Image: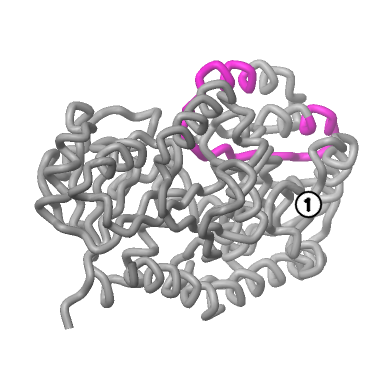
């Protein structure tokens, strides 16, 4: 039986690693379903907003074999309706998957779909948290104008919306309208993360010393500045913080640098920049706790990765990972309560090896249970099947 063709339009893809978790939604979708569907990914030819240099390991303006997908890397001049129409005529996809609401590849495809030649292609739109109230407040004028334009031009006519969770679905209804079709399908993780990890590889946890790791793109909504301010209240003990991620918002980074200059001498800050996936996992393995006081998060691949590395989470309560508290694999603390954030940092500092080992095991078990849940893959299978019936 011939496999149906799924064409994905997304901002970034492999061999990139600097663009955050949204890219992995596509990577894991491809790897899990390539035995059933043929995947054709159309993406930019560079690695994230902070790195505009074209890849030198792939061919721009042509199809490349990348893992289980064929990938077409676009130069900036190819992000046009004309180029997209040519690709659609060439590949004749059965389904189109858009991995963003606001990205230029997604918008360009939707404009291309206005041509009656392509109007019948089933379309899945995955907002990846872009429609949450907190995210919409960032660059709110630009986003608000676009959403008005989308409604006026019926840009999202007959699309199927993919929500990661029911909270995500309600955000879609609030931003787009109540009369839309939404299917919930959690973001797909890889099937395994460090399957041979031995928790004895984790660093010793002695009272009065702690190592945190922060992994994220350096943008305002990830709230690193808030974390640095909380750390500045801890003037006793040996505290180390690894910051992993590309600097995307230079103005915000200047604010973070100013806060970092005020850190007391007992705190060591390691700004490591963007790292590959294996390098990032190694950094998390070598840390005690993962910390991210995010203003908003749709899913957060990095959370499941940190848990799999035996890193309990210290995160804001603006995520879908509240279950870490009952599982003993971390804490959620409101951003509106900075005193409790400082107290929890102090608690991590004072924790001994026995208590940490218990939490590290709980974190690892939480990740393994989550990765093994068959319902996660089944939800994405139903989403693709629904689109293929159009």
Crowding around mark 1 (Cα neighbors within 10 Å: few <14, some 14 to 19, many 20+) is many
Q: Which one is nearer the viewer's eye here, 299 or 162?
A: 162
Can residue 44 be seen from the camera position used here? Answer: yes
- Would residue 271 be counted in the magenta stretch? no
**Extreme residue in the bottom direction:** 1
Q: Which one is nearer the viewer's eye here, 374 or 208?
A: 374
Q: Which residues are magenta?
A: 230-257
Q: How many marks?
A: 1
Q: Position of residue 196 (x, y in %)?
A: 48, 75
The colour scheme used here is one colour
Look at 63% across and 64% down and name the residue there.
310
Q: Which one is nearer the viewer's eye here, 368 or 155?
A: 155
Query: Where 332 falls versus 68 (above or below)?
Result: above
- Would residue 247 be counted in the magenta stretch? yes
Query: Where 78 falls versus 188 (above or below)?
Result: above
Look at 42% across and 74% down and name the residue there.
381
Q: Which one is nearer the viewer's eye here, 367 or 343?
A: 367
Q: Is residue 304 left or right of residue 160?
A: right
Look at 22% across and 50% down and name the residue there.
118
Image quarter of residue 224: top right
Q: Position of residue 125 (x, y in %)?
A: 43, 52
Q: Is residue 192 left or right of residue 251?
A: left
Look at 53% across and 60% down and name the residue there.
182
Query: Quick one: quadrant of the N terminus?
Result: bottom left
Query: Where 167 falls versus 208 (above or below)?
Result: below
Query: Quick one: quadrant of the C terminus?
Result: bottom left
Q: Position of residue 368 (x, y in %)?
A: 58, 74
Can residue 67 be seen from the camera position used here? Answer: no
Q: Which residue is mark 1?
A: 332
Q: Is residue 181 left or right of residue 159?
A: right
Q: Position of residue 291 (x, y in %)?
A: 68, 46
Dot 1 falls on a residue whose secondary structure is strand
């Amino acid at each position: 039986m011939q496999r149906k063709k799924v064409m994905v339009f997304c901002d970034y893809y492999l061999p990139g690693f600097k663009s955050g978790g949204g890219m992995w939604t596509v990577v894991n979708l491809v790897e899990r379903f390539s035995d059933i569907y043929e995947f054709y990914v159309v993406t930019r030819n560079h690695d994230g907003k902070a790195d505009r240099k074209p890849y030198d390991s792939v061919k721009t303006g042509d199809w490349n074999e990348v893992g289980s997908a064929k990938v077409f890397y676009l130069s900036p001049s190819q992000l046009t309706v004309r180029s997209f129409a040519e690709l659609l005529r060439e590949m004749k996809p059965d389904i189109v998957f858009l991995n963003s609401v606001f990205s230029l590849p997604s918008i360009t495809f939707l404009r291309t779909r206005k041509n009656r030649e392509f109007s019948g292609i089933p379309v899945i739109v995955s907002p990846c948290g872009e429609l949450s109230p907190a995210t919409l407040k960032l660059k709110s004028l630009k986003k608000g104008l676009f959403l008005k334009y989308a409604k006026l031009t019926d840009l999202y006519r007959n699309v199927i919306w993919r929500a990661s969770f029911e909270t995500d679905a309600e955000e879609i209804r609030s931003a787009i309208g109540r009369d839309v079709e939404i299917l919930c399908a959690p973001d797909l993780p890889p099937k395994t993360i460090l399957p041979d990890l031995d928790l004895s590889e984790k660093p010793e946890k002695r009272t009065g010393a702690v190592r945190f790791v922060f992994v994220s793109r350096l943008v305002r909504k990830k709230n690193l500045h808030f974390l640095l301010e909380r750390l500045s209240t801890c003037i006793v003990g040996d505290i180390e913080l690894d910051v992993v991620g590309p600097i995307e918002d230079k103005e915000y980074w200047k604010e973070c640098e100013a806060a970092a200059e005020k850190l007391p001498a007992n705190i060591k800050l390691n700004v490591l920049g963007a790292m590959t996936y294996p390098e990032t996992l190694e950094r998390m393995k070598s840390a005690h706790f993962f910390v991210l006081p995010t203003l908003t998060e749709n899913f957060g691949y990095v959370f499941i990765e940190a848990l799999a590395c035996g890193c309990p989470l210290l995160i804001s309560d603006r995520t879908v990972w509240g279950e870490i508290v009952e599982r003993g694999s971390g804490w959620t603390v409101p951003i509106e309560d900075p005193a409790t954030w400082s107290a929890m940092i102090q608690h991590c500092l004072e924790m001994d090896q026995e208590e940490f080992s218990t939490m590290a095991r709980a974190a690892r078990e939480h990740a393994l249970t989550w990765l093994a849940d068959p319902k996660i893959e089944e939800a994405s299978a139903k989403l693709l099947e629904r689109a293929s019936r159009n």
